[in-house]
Image: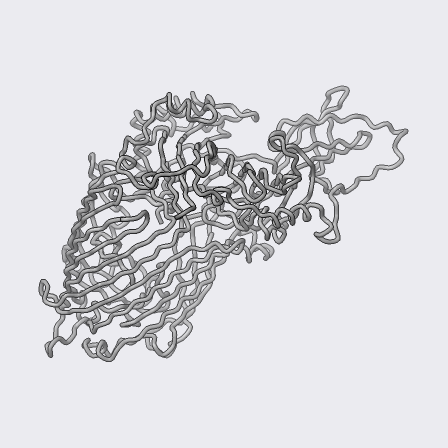
Amino acid sequence: MMLTNNFKYYLSYFSIILFGFLQAQNSASGRIIDEKTNAPVTGVAIFINDSNTPYTTASSGNFSIQSDTIIYKLKFQKKNYAVESINISPESFQDLIIKMSAEKVSNIEAVVIHNERPKFKNKKENPAYAIMQKVWERKRNNGLDKFDTYTYKEYEKIQFDANNLDSAFMKRKIFNKLEFIFDYKDSTASGKIGLPVFLNEAIYENYGENKPSKRTKRLLVAQKTSGFQDNQIITLTAKNLYRDINIYDNTLNYFDIGFPSPAGETGFSTYDYNLVDTISIRGEKAFKIRYQPKRTEVLAFQGYLYIDTDSYAVLGAILKSTQKINVNFINGISTELEYDNPDENTFLPRKFVTEIEMTPFSKKKTSKSIIAKRSVDYSEYQFNKPLEDNVFKRKEEEYDDKFVDKDDAYWLKARPDSLSKSEQGIYDMLDKLQQTPKFNRIVKLYETLGSGYYNIVKGIDLGPIFSIYGKNEVEGDRIRLGARTYFTRNDPWRVQFYTAYGFKDQQVKYGAEARFMFNRVNRFTIGAGTRRDILQLGVQLTNDDGIMARTFASSTLFARGENASLSSVNQTNVFTAIEPWKNFQIRLDGTMQSIKSANPSGFNLMYYKDGNLRQTTNDSHITLSLIARPGAKFSQTGIDRYEHGTLAPTIVLKYTRGIEGLFGSDFSYNKLQFMFYKPILIGSWGKLLLNFEAGKNFDTVPLALQNVIPGNQSYSLAQNTFAQLNYYEFVADTYTTLHLEHHFNGKILSYIPLIKKLKLREIAFIRGAYGTLSDASKAINVAGFKYSAPSEHIYYEYGVGIENIGFGNLRIFRVDFNWRGNYLDRPDISIFGIKAGFQVGF
């Protein structure tokens, strides 16, 4: 979710300078002239690669070609001229000069155009296949895993460039009083204008131990960001665009979407391979193998593999997306990889360079866009040198705001290559922009849209602005206003509050919470809060006890049927949390609350206690939560952290103990809950979202404290709920739920003519719940006869969805079609339903 918000912010922020397009080997341009006279030659047939069919005919002496597949060769033919061929490479594809020479007629017996691309009866006759078989047989592992200890240095540079600008674009009103930024522009070879807009440099020291125990540490020792040191959303968005990849893996992760690797063992199911040359790579003799996807509509790459002729190790690779890449906001991806191979079994990363072309609006090559380039240099490898335990410990100074500040002299020495003139100018340009009122107003606007908060004075933000208005059955129209403290991105403390008013019930609601973190290393934190509000309980099983956690009081503006099952909650919470190990949190909450129906005539929460009928449930409990996020990456060191996009799982184990008599509590009870969530890439077949939950109430409690299988009566999408269940339809002492949702990324629809042009993506899902409810738990509630658990059969529902609905690169709408699988004889149920909503992401 954080990635989604930050990416939306980034798109808005950089919309003032979106531009151009990324050209690669999918395009070529130049002039065709007579070798002797230098006069333009017209009517020349141009063939792409080894095709026998002309791609186009140049009506003038100039030509410009755009292709859906990679262009590695062009052939030019005209009557009375000799056939000319030219190889196309990333370094040579623009401003080409083709010189046509007259053919000697007396020497011509016949003109025959040969298809030079070899044809094979089967893949075993293809020499490239034999080479790739050797690569797969001798698949290498990352050399870091074979040594007892290792260290190495990592230099990372991320740069955003606005290219392909023109004079009309620079004269737009939005640049009034900002014209000085174009003093830092560059002219490209095509005559267009490029403008660097963001630069982030970082130095990391990496430490690893494989024996006797497995430990790693990646220490950020220096960072320099052009003008955005105080704007973490920009820097985080930049880093979130990239994932670490291993060319030998079957699936490569880009934007948490799986792309088939051309060097993976399953590569031949996606790619065609051709051996085109034998060349020298850093003094090593290498096969140059060209690969292309068999179908351009799939998420795959095209480019070259460079394979050592002796060891069959991958020395390098070029990966370029096809013209028909179906990823939101992305027009193109290009990655160049270099590897060192210290022995026959291992490899070491040497240099990775990735360029991503982004635009929120159009897939057309003429649309304005941003080129995001990340280069990483790996150096100073050292192996099997003893490492002290202290190296792997988190230290207080590492979390200091000034820890990564380094002077210019440090950077001159630390960089593997000096900055270009345009890169050097970014720091100066954006420092000047920070002093420009107009620019700061623009930044403030997009910060508000991205974070949901509007800064009114230093340290105080109003918001969230998207929660100002809501509506429900009890309150009618509802207005909510809130605020928070926010001095810097690394604040060790935060105070938040809100107040709300319902025009139907004419009641004022409120909530407030304060949190303070004592230690940045183990994130030892305490907090306290209180609220009085109308809430929709029963929409989460493993819920957050925090006062300012998301509520569902007013989120449903449109729903199927009337929802009167809202609760009036008075709640006070205190908590403490600590991370004794990285990505592992222990949290202890103490909660005192009273719960009653917010609409007694339509929703009954009354229960029997010691023979007496009560309408308010008084509860005091403590909750111990163990939360693990292995592999998760976070930015910032303050009370609030921003999470990098990863495929890290979330594992939660919670124990709740209700204490009767404490602050007037009515019940003693014990509850145990477990949750596991994990996104899983399944090769080229997309991504599976798995969510499993289980829990048990060991004692009898009233409905207000019971486990409710989450329903969703709204017409909007709600994660980990059951679309065709009514609120409180199933209640359980003991429960298990499983949600499986698979995103195919358009793999199936890409086979359907006409439909594939819409670039829609298919989703399939199934959800199940099983539970039991004791007779005692039914009897304690006045309306207990209404409630039951899915104990007779596993309740299930299933469906399909269509996502990526929109136009151009702005495809953020999703529609789900849901069917209820069983328990069809119940009154007031919905067997089929449609849910829809916005889903911002790649």
Q: Is residue 45 left or right of residue 747?
A: right
Residue 58 picture location, percent across and down: 70, 33
Task: Identify which residue is drawn at 12% across, 72% down.
Answer: 614
Tally the marks.
0
Question: Relative to 829, is 766 on the left or the right?
Answer: right
Residue in the image at 42% along x and 23% along y: 413
Q: How is the image coloured?
A: one colour
Residue 718 or residue 470, whichever sits in front: 718
Q: Is residue 508 among what the camera can see?
A: yes
Nearer-the-camera pick, 255 or 45? 255
Q: Residue at x 84, y 37 (%)?
A: 111
| Position of residue 491 in the picture relative to residue 770 (left or right) | left
Viewer-side residue, 754 vs 6 = 6
Residue 351 place in picture, x, y as percent: 51, 35
Q: Position of residue 182 (x, y in %)?
A: 43, 23
**In the rendered view, would you say 724 is above or below 190?**
below
| Quadrant of the rendered image containing residue 561 | bottom left
Quadrant in the rendering for residue 729: bottom left
Q: Could you say which quadrant of the image residue 570 lies in?
A: bottom left
Is residue 156 something one can see in this rendering? no
State the image coordinates of residue 833 (x, y, percent, origin top left). 40, 66
